[in-house]
Amino acid sequence: MNINIYYGGRGVIEDPTLSVLKKIESVLDELRVNVTRYNLYDMKNSIMTLPQTLKDADGIILAASVEWNGIGGYLQLFLDACWLYGDKSKISRIYMTPVVISTTYGEKEGLLSLTNAWELLGGKICQGFSAYVEDYIDFESNVSYGSYIEKRAENIYRTISQHIMTLPSSSLAIKQNLIHTSLELTPQEGEQLSKYVSDDIYVQKQKEDIEELASYFKGILGEDGFDSETEFIKPFKSQFVPQDNFSASYMLIIEDKKKTLYIKVENKDLYIKYEKNSSADIVAKLSHECLDNIIRGRMTFQRAFMTGEMTAKGNFKTLRMLDQVFAFNQS
């Protein structure tokens, strides 16, 4: 029996999800199951190719660490890849066990989200479990919790080995309708396309071609393009929401443009300019595309940080205030 584990957390030492996976892997190893774990945080540039790893899998475990809201960007990207490039006939024979551990809130919602996603893909569901962990040490050392996890691991083995039947759900009917209206690819075409998507050189070349075309058409239309000294400043000013008794400074380093945007908030006053200030309360690094997505309301600063698209140093509470001080996602 082959079981793949796709871990969607950030890999921090005291992530209770890793503790749970360690216990599950120990039980499955004793049952002589071939277990392969994929730590998605280490595979950012190749997640889109991972549907290929489902070829020999009898079952999979999708393990989510809920630190704020949702199952996290890595697991969502993997599921997107399965939808776009996965072999649906193979997926239909694979049992998926969701394991969701939360340190804040949302473990039940995460469990439901993974279950619904796999059903929409046409796969089979093996009963998973979720938990809220307030204290890592207490959770790790609790004998009763450990026994419970081991029994659930045994149930995973039993469900897959005995090919236990699952009852139909409405998600299957929805999935069939969606498949009819989506692009149909052979497994070989899906595999090849996923390689293109994850090929940094290929993707970069496509981006360069698009940028070249954009510059060409801007020239035809008589546009000057953006001013690197003022870009992003206007939307920050227009979406500024003053906060009483709040002051903070932020330095946003736009790495791929080699530009630094300095923002200082002092109650109802806002100062923003492209300059460096080493005394900023928060120093964040992100790409031009990430910041553009935030300003367009497609992403929040909080989500960018949690998914790893933005890194930051400083007080976490001060960082979280960015989404309140600048209401991009509400416009």
Image (spheres, rainbow, N blue to C red):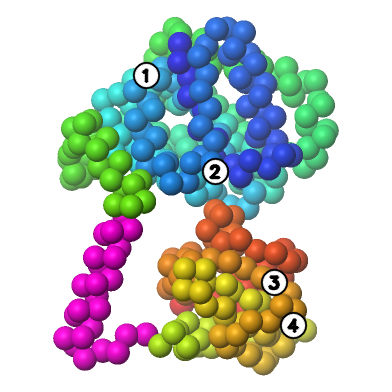
Residue tagged by mark 3?
282
Evaluate if marks 3 and 4 touch, with contact meaning CB atoms under 8 Å apart: no
Q: CA distance from mark 1 to mark 2?
A: 23 Å
Residue 240, placed above or below residue 136:
below
Q: CA distance from mark 3 to mark 1?
A: 46 Å
Q: Position of residue 45 (x, y in %)?
A: 43, 46
**Left or right of residue 312, residue 226 in this image:** left
Residue tagged by mark 1?
56
On residue 41, the disc is 2
Q: CA distance from mark 3 to mark 4?
A: 12 Å
Residue at disc 3, secondary structure = strand
Residue in the image at 73% along x and 74% along y = 281
**What main secondary structure does the magenta stretch of the protein show?**
helix
> Which picture quadrant has residue 24?
top right
Q: Position of residue 211 (x, y in %)?
A: 28, 71
Q: CA distance from mark 1 to mark 4?
A: 55 Å
Q: In front here: 45 or 127? A: 45
- Give, as a three-letter code, the residue at label 4: Ser
Residue at disc 4, secondary structure = strand
Near mark 4 (Cα within 10 A), the count class, few <14, some 14-19 or many ≥20, is: some
On residue 247, the disc is 4
Question: Is residue 168 in sight in this rendering?
Answer: no
Q: In front here: 179 or 197? A: 197
Magenta-tinted stretch:
203-226
- Give, as a three-letter code, the residue at label 2: Tyr
